[in-house]
Amino acid sequence: MSWNGHDYPVTFTNITTPPTMSVIIILLLASISVAALFLGAFLWSVKTGQYDDEMSPPMRMLLDSVPAKESKEQVKVESL
Amino acid sequence: MPEIAVSQKSKVQCYHCGEDCDEKTIIAHEKNFCCDGCKMVFEILNKTGMCDYYTISDNPGTNQRIKIREDKFAFLDDQKIQSALLIFANETETHVNFYLPQMHCSSCLWLLENLHRLNENVIGSKVNFERKEADIVFDHRKVSMRQVAELLASIGYEPYISFKDLKQQRPSLNMSKIYKLGVAGFCFANIMLFSFPEYLGIDSQELFLQGTFRYMNIILSLPVFFYSSSEFYISAWKSLKHGFLNIDAPIVLAVAVAFTRSLYEVLSGTGAGYFDSMAGIVFFMLIGRVLQDKTYQQLSFERDYTAYFPIAVTRIKEEQTEAVALPDIVLDDTLLIHHQELIPADGILTRGKAMIDYSFVTGESVPVEKEMGEIVYAGGKQIGSNIELLVIKEVSQSYLTKLWNRSELQRDRNDEERSFVHLLSRYFTWILFTIAAAAAIYWWLHDPSRIGQVVTAVLIVACPCSLLLSNTFTNGNILRRLGRNQFYLRNAQTIEDIANINYIVFDKTGTLTTGRYQDINYDGADISESIKEKIAVLASHSTHPMSKAIAEWTKQTSIQNISVADFKELPGKGIEGTVKGDRLKLGSAFFVQKTEQGSSLDSVVFVSVNGTVLGRFGFRNHYREQVPALMKKLRKLGYPISILSGDNAGEKEYLEEMLGKGTPILFHQKPEDKLEAIKKIQATGKRVMMVGDGLNDAGALKQADVGIAITENTATFTPASDVILEASMLPRFHQFLFMCKANKVLVWTAFIVSILYNIVGESFAVSGNLSPMVAAILMPASSLTILLISFGASNLLSWKMNLK
């Protein structure tokens, strides 16, 4: 599966040869890993309790407020 | 000019709470307030420059007319109670979670998250709006938990702390289904993508690609098969252990068959398998499950007496008062009960005059007077002055608590086996096996090599996922629709239970009536304004709610300066006194006339002036809006109705008129009587729905096939039940019943449609032509049709009935 094979340049009729296939395999892996990244993000968001309360965040973002001193333990405690 | 303005805008609204102000409007800072409490909250916020509170939403506060007793939160100084309530503490900070039922708008959120601006020792606070809770972090070296609670109370958010908080941790949300759904969605989408080449056909020269895609599919299907589907394996296994075939069993079969066959096909290089269909089934069914499992975080359907009782009361020990946690109360303790406080344990009244409102516990609409030396039962609310009690039974032994511990109320009904869906799925499974067997015999005769292929195809394509989908999606949608109309169901099974009931039992006090207000009608000689004034003066000298109601009825306002001479109050009989030279008596027939005459019911008060009887006041409970109309509609729908009331029979005639002669209406029903009455009706083969509100209905609510608790405010206590209904929606009760009935029709319709799809799919499978492509088209098509039917029809229905 080397890139610098002798059968360069690729023609469309010649698309089935192994060097081009490797491109598809790489694309495939790339797309899967991007999708897996999103899956990971989703699972993380559920785990950190972002779906526990669906009502306050939409309100909170519209309110201007002086930010409170954030406590480090806060998140940990909430997920208990 | 101001007068015109007032008359145009009929009432003045309180700047804080938005309620109409009566005559006693307080004007301060150029704003109107209905009471001192509201004004005080405003001033606190004004001082700290937090008036943004009023600009985020209009009149965001809650009414502060009822003052909170000064040392109400004294119990929070108790170390034991503190440690039970806090979530986390280190040397510098303490985390505590308070339930704040008053929370209702974005202003509340803003204010509660800016607590640190009101008190710099509060480090931070975070609101969970759905649960109406606030996590508060404070520096316990500088501010105590009690002070934090008092700070919240001072700005109008009084924390609600009950006995239950001492005992158990709140349950955490179960998110495992969501994880499974996420994984299944990810795998399903990618398997579909990798299967496209198979659908579209692959050149013989591209076999290398084909192989790669197939092996990728195997890898992706592993998490679906082993993780996401575990939901169904567990459920199917559980019911199999009970010797019962539930709907998940055929689904597990289909998933397992699809997986093994696909695995075999790919590994042996004979085909691509049905990984896409399998992942799709699991994904869609998990969506249905998640939809159906809608929970109302702010509600609790499992409350028992512990949630009703306060966390602590005041105990008198050696002339000192101290706060004591409820479980620590022992025999012979002397308790001090304040106005509006709950009596936590059975005891003997040792000081003060008890006027106890038992309406929530027994259903009696009129408070009961108790003399010194009498036994007072737990659960009532003291009205009026402070009283002292000598405890004769500990909290866990009291009359009220015992009712809860009755064995028949402890058992849980098996939700699973009741649903008709499981029955349907059982038929489905047998028919499926018959088809598979028939196909096997046919192919054995014609081409034995294809038996395996055909039989597995039959099992894969006919999986009853459509039935399950139609069931879960319709249930989920109806659950949400009803919830939006403040008819909150415990779970999806309740929809079916409601559809199946054929007998309705109502409680009276607090359910059909509001319990608090009473309608008065006067019957007798005309009363002049001057006599009215005298009656008002006399009546306002008593704290008895009937006297108060009479005083209100007279509509006399300027009576504060008139005095009563020779005032006498005979508990349970009446009051008398001399006002401006006239001797007035208010009370029972015997007390006023010295003769036993007329009805002997409690709800009549006679009035006499100088010995001549003028007439009588009849009291009637104030019925909720449109109750008679609702009863009519329910009877039209064919439901027999009964009424079980803990109250006296004073309303009998009115109720009979409303419900028609022959309706069983029982009075003086103790909590156990209600439970037994429900059992008796059930013994005649009826499926009973009980609608009640108080602790006295708790047993009946649990015993009934469906228990509905009515509440004026979902934040307050309701006994354990299947449904919680907001009282204002009671007039639409019949529509909710109708929705639940329609649910079954919808599930059936969707099921029939899915059967049609199944016939098409089976015809492919039996003839041995089920290509992965056909399966991949049929499966989403049938699911989508079912989604359309269940969502479309239930939304159309609720739109037609004008429901939200």
Image: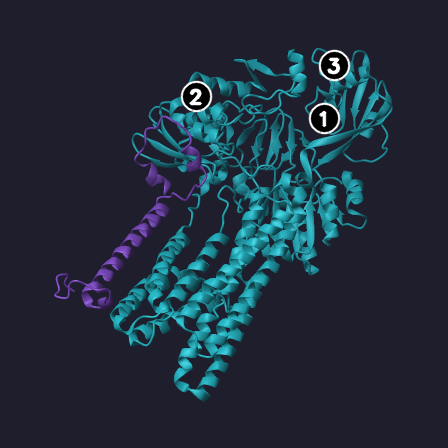
Chain colours: A purple, B cyan
**Residue at 67% across, 29% down:** B371
Please state the horizontal and vertical placement of residue B377, each as a whole percent of the image: 61, 37
Residue B236 is at least partly visible in this image:
no
Please state the horizontal and vertical placement of residue B380, each as a whole percent of the image: 61, 35
Q: Which of B392 and B305 is in front in this view?
A: B305
Mark drawn on residue B549:
1
**Disc on the earlier residue, 3 or 2:** 2
Q: What distance separates the C-alpha of mark 1 from that of mark 2? A: 40 Å
- Closer to us: mark 1 or mark 3? 1
Three-letter code, disc 3 = Val
- In the shown orientation, is residue B170 left or right of residue B538? left
Disc 1 chain ID: B
Q: Mark 3 points at which residue?
A: B564
Disc 3 chain ID: B
Three-letter code, disc 1 = Ala
Mark drawn on residue B50:
2
Please state the horizontal and vertical placement of residue B201, each as a whole percent of the image: 34, 70
Q: What distance separates the C-alpha of mark 3 from that of mark 2? A: 48 Å
Q: Nearer the viewer, residue B221 or B21?
A: B221
